[in-house]
Image: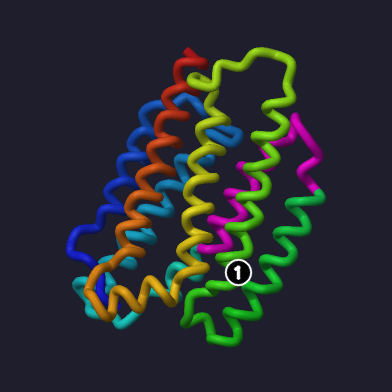
Amino acid sequence: MNVPPFPFAIIVEFICLVFSLLYLVKEKTGLYAYFKWMLLLTVIVETVGYLMITYFHQKTNHWLHNLLMPVTTCFVFYVMHWLNRLYFNTKPWLIAGLSIFFMLYFYESFASNFKEFSSVSNSFVSVCFIIVCGLYYYYLLKQDEYINLAKHPPFWIITGCFFFYFGRTACNFFYTYLITIHQKNGIPIRYFIFIVLNFILYSCWSYAFICKYKQKK
């Protein structure tokens, strides 16, 4: 597995972690408090995975990201529930989505002895998140009350998730084609796409933290 020398994604994640520590410092419980811990865990796992490949010359770190996947999935499902709970009944969607995800995840993980990345599970939850994000936009547009979207933290959190998971789903769908281009032409298109997707996701989240801080202040 060829890893580019500079870990752009980890840098962006770390910057977002710093924003969460600065602007969510007063959040002790609830959704926004959990962002700090989730981002810290993400940065640690991504850094360890990068070091495994770059400095310890491991052939793959798929198993490490595979262990992180259920935690990340549960967290994003919780985010979707928290931000959508006032608009529509999220429980049927989330219970069904999580149930199917864990069935796929354990099937793939045990089949590969937890050594390979559970790509089908990853693609499934990405589609689930896109659907729930779409429902958020739909019900948000139906609201009678005025909402300043430029200063509305949930809007920016959902928007970051929507673009990230939409892009990730597209990459998963064209995975073989992108890998072929990389092998034949030496152009890591998939890597560049994920740099952009990570930048969009964590920029939106960082801005949401600023908006939340200003509301609290």
Percent x, y of residue 158: 56, 38
Q: Is residue 44 above or below residue 28?
A: below
Choose between 65 and 169: the one closer to the eye.
169
- Residue placed at 60% from the left, 80% from the top? 108
Q: Which residue is mark 1?
A: 121
Mark 1 Cα shell of 10 Å, populated few (<14), some (14-19), many (≥20): many
Q: From the viewer's perspective, is 13 left or right of 152?
A: left
Q: Is residue 53 above or below residue 90?
A: below
Percent x, y of residue 13: 35, 47
Percent x, y of residue 213: 45, 21
- Residue placed at 58% from the left, 49% from the top? 76
Q: Quadrant of residue 121?
A: bottom right
Percent x, y of residue 140: 68, 28
Start-end of magenta stretch: 69-91
Q: Main SS type for the magenta part?
A: helix
Q: From the viewer's perspective, is 207 left or right of 187?
A: right
Choose between 55 and 11: the one closer to the eye.
11
Magenta includes 37?
no
Q: Quadrant of residue 84?
A: top right
Q: Is residue 81 above or below residue 191?
A: above
- Residue placed at 45% from the left, 72% from the top? 175
- Residue placed at 54% from the left, 56% from the top? 72
